[in-house]
Image (spheres, helix red, strand yellow):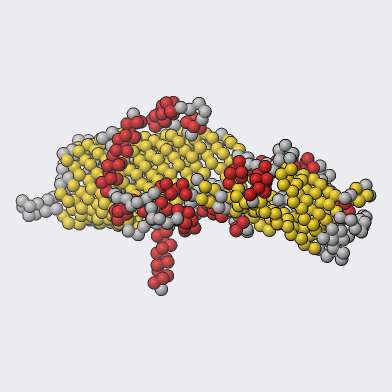
Amino acid sequence: MFNQIFKYYIKAFLCVLVCVSCTKDVDFNQFNDLQLTPVFESSLVYIDEPANKFLVNGNETSYLQDSVNIDFFNDSFVVDHLVKAEFLLETTNSINRSFIVEVDMFDDSNQLQHRFSFSSSGSPDHSPLVTEHLEVFENDALEALKNTTKLVFTLYILPGEPINENTIGRITLKSKGSFYLKIER
Amino acid sequence: MIKKHIFIIIILVSCFALSQNKQILYGFSDIPQALLLNPGGKVTNDWYFGIPLLSHIHVNVGTTGSTVYDVFANDGRDFNLKLQNAIYSMKSNDFLSINEQLEVFSGGFKIGPSYEKDKYISFGLYQEFDFIGYFPKDYAILAYEGNQSNINRVFKASDFNAKAELISVFHVGYNKKVNKNFTFGVRGKIYSSIMNANSTNNKGYFITVDGTNNFYDHIFNLDLELRTSGLTSLTGDNANSETALKDIKKRLFLGGNLGLGFDVGFTYQLNKQWMVDASLQDVGFIRHTKDVENYKVEGNYVFEGVNPLFPETGTGQTAEDYWNEIKTQFEDVFVVDTTYTKYTTWRPEKLNVSVNYTFGEKTSQECNCLIPDGGYQNAIGLQLFAVNRPRQPQLALTAYYYRRIFKGLQAKATYTLDSYTLSNIGLGVSANIGNLNFYVMADNFLEYQNVYNAQSVSLQLGFNYIFKKHED
């Protein structure tokens, strides 16, 4: 019975529609041309450490290191639609020691996929010195990013005036990612 | 000055919209289905029955935003550019509305002492589909541009606002002519909801602002819910088309989620030529208790990135605690909770009010005199229609001209102001061939030249078998 309802209904509806209406040329296949190109930005990691964080049991350490496991870059949506990415890292250093910031990117089987680093100069008068680094991911680097499931951050402290409990200054790191997507039918 | 007037008119008109408006049928007392719009309307027949499944077919589709033609015209212009224009030109109050009704059966008859049958009983069962969806502007902008160019812009969660329902309605109406000037009526309704989905009360926002510890703070404050009934059993793993069809049939005949409602209305003859009437339809609710499944996203979260080094500093928190906390906070907000809480929906109440003036008494060619009780041949009037919608009531104002062309053929032309267009002209005719009555009506005639470019299209038609003792 339900089928009949629809049969009658559609027939009657079409009859009336055909009798009274005309249409102009439309092309619904144009939907296949759909292309969205949004750009999303997100904060990534941040660090804010005073000079004396580089003391372990009273002795100066040559680096600080930790890692972040991340399932975002290898997500199938990202893999399919990410066409370019940029990481902007900004350090503000008021310690009278220079640093190297290094980011190592590993895949699931712990294979290094990509590595980048930059230096942040020491500040002899402890005024905040800002250093920026822009890492662009395109082509091979983009593929490396899409394989990445672990980021390792290392802060190397370069030789200079020894650090003790009273050493002045701190180092901060801010970072954000810009993700250029291209979504097509 | 003129500019100001135009502005005021545009503002006024943008509040007007027709949807579920049957401005041509309203007050068209030659058609029995007019009693569904005003149970206290004038009754002109002794009894009738609707031809099953064909007695009332109604479709109304309307959009206040861009039309299908705006986006899909085969004009060689870049599709994405046209889409972009549509997204940027539409507002979050723009909507798409679809309303469809199909009468399964209906009938009515006069009752009372044989010398004065002043009461009328009508009844029937009809199926109705109703959808309204507002344009989710902020979601569209976020998907289209991303947040990079929208730092500090608030993306409102409430921009997602839509509801759809498929119901059947069993109804019985009582109409009483109290005296020659006053008629009133009521109609009781039992609703059976076949399917329902609604998400009309979303709150919260997403915003990216400059942060303190990092470049940005991403603030999520979300309270979103989609409630459904009658869908899970049809779409679930155990569902197949055979059982689904059986289920739908059962629900069509009062086997769904049930509700109650009523219509009331009256007609009052002020004097021989002036008449006012009004009705309130679908004051009622549906209680959704069976086959309910709701989805909810709720929570607050501020994301500023993560601190990979020594997160335990100062607070005694271990690195593991730190990671677990971030994970929990994320899940609290973004993992969709499924609940089975029963809920109640209210039917969209509708109000009709009209003022009517009749003129042009019928003269007999035989004696060149007025036929007593022959009635007037013309009527003009104003009708106001309002329907309660999730965001704001929608209104439509109609001026009409009604004419009895000759015995058994009546016509009504309408001009309606609504938010879709300023040139909504409608036309309806009702014809009797013997006892068989046929009516058809449609509005927005000027837009039928290109249906794809129409902001709204409305059609009603039907067949009845009508019996009258006193034909005029």
Residue at (23% x, 48% y) in the render: B429
Instruction: Give the residue at the far front of this rendering.
Output: A140
Place of residue A162 in the rendered image (x, y in percent of width and height, measured from the top left): 93, 56
Instruction: Give the residue at the far bottom of this rendering.
Output: B1
State which quadrant residue B99 falls in.
top left
Q: Is residue A11 visible?
A: yes
Q: How many marks?
A: 0
Judging depth in this view, the residue of B237 and B461 nearest the camera is B237
Q: Quadrant of the C terminus of chain B?
A: top left
Residue at (56% x, 39% y) in the render: B295
Residue at (30% x, 35% y) in the render: A8
Place of residue B136 in the rendered image (x, y in percent of width and height, measured from the top left): 51, 51
Q: In this view, does A128 lie above or below A73?
A: below
Place of residue B280 in the rendered image (x, y in percent of width and height, measured from the top left): 38, 47
Q: Quadrant of the N terminus of chain B?
A: bottom left
Q: Could you tell whether B393 is left or right of B22 in the image?
A: right
Q: In this view, does B311 lie above or below A158?
A: above
Place of residue B423 in the rendered image (x, y in percent of width and height, measured from the top left): 32, 58
Q: Is residue B10 above or below residue B253?
A: below
Q: Could you tell whether A38 is left or right of A52 in the image?
A: left
Judging depth in this view, the residue of B119 and B48 nearest the camera is B48
Residue at (39% x, 32% y) in the render: B252
Q: Could you tell whether B204 is left or right of A156 in the image?
A: left
Q: Is residue B62 visible?
A: no
